[in-house]
Amino acid sequence: MEILLTREQSSMASTWTEKLGTFKTPEGDWIIGNIANKILGSIYDLVEEDKLYDENGELKIPEFIDSQKIAGLEDGEYLTLDEYEFIDYPVRFTKDNFEPAIHYFEEYNWDNHKNYEQAIDTLKELLSK
């Protein structure tokens, strides 16, 4: 998975990081979509109570749980994995038909991102390989 852009999103109840990612399928076409780190579950359910906090009273985020690499903590409670999943409706495109990717950028307002042009250049470079 190649991450093209990242932005912070929030609602009244939570804040999260959203990423725009793309990858080449085994068939040779490409998929682009909004991605997020997979959520493993609540730290309070997955870590024993006596191992939750450090000496300063801060949550201790484990490096691994059941051999799964932990990427971080989302929303102050949820352990995320070092793996991604699509969180909406990704689209397929090819190097010969790049237009669906451009429409995707526009539909999800990634074209307003300050690094939009750089992301398009990166995508074009990936397609040329």
Image (cartoon, rainbow, N blue to C red):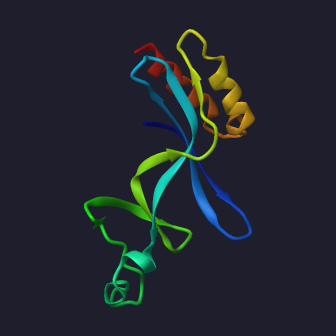
Would residue 50 be found to the left or right of residue 22 on screen? left
Direction left: furthest residue: 67
Q: Is residue 52 above or below residue 29?
A: below
Q: Is residue 23 above or below residue 52?
A: above
| Residue closest to the eye, 122 or 10 | 10
Residue at 42% x, 84% y: name it: 58
117 sits to left or right of 51: right
Position of residue 109 measured from the top left corner of the image (x, y, whole percent) = 72, 39
For the N terminus, the image quarter is top left
Task: Name the residue at the top extreme.
Answer: 96
Q: Quadrant of the C terminus?
A: top left
Query: Where residue 25 sits: x, y (%)?
Result: 43, 25
Residue ID at (44%, 80%): 44
Disc tally is 0
Eyeballing the image, is 121 above or below 64? above
Which residue is located at x 67 percent, y 24 percent? 102
How far across and down, in percent of the image, does residue 55 sit? 33, 90
Q: Is residue 95 left or right of residue 89?
A: left
When the figure is inspected, residue 83 is found, relative to residue 118, above or below; the finding is: below
Taking depth in this image into account, of 46 and 93 the one nearest to the observer is 46
> Which picture quadrant has residue 62?
bottom left
Residue 96, picture quadrant: top right
Residue 114, picture quadrant: top right
Residue 7: x %, y % from top left: 61, 50
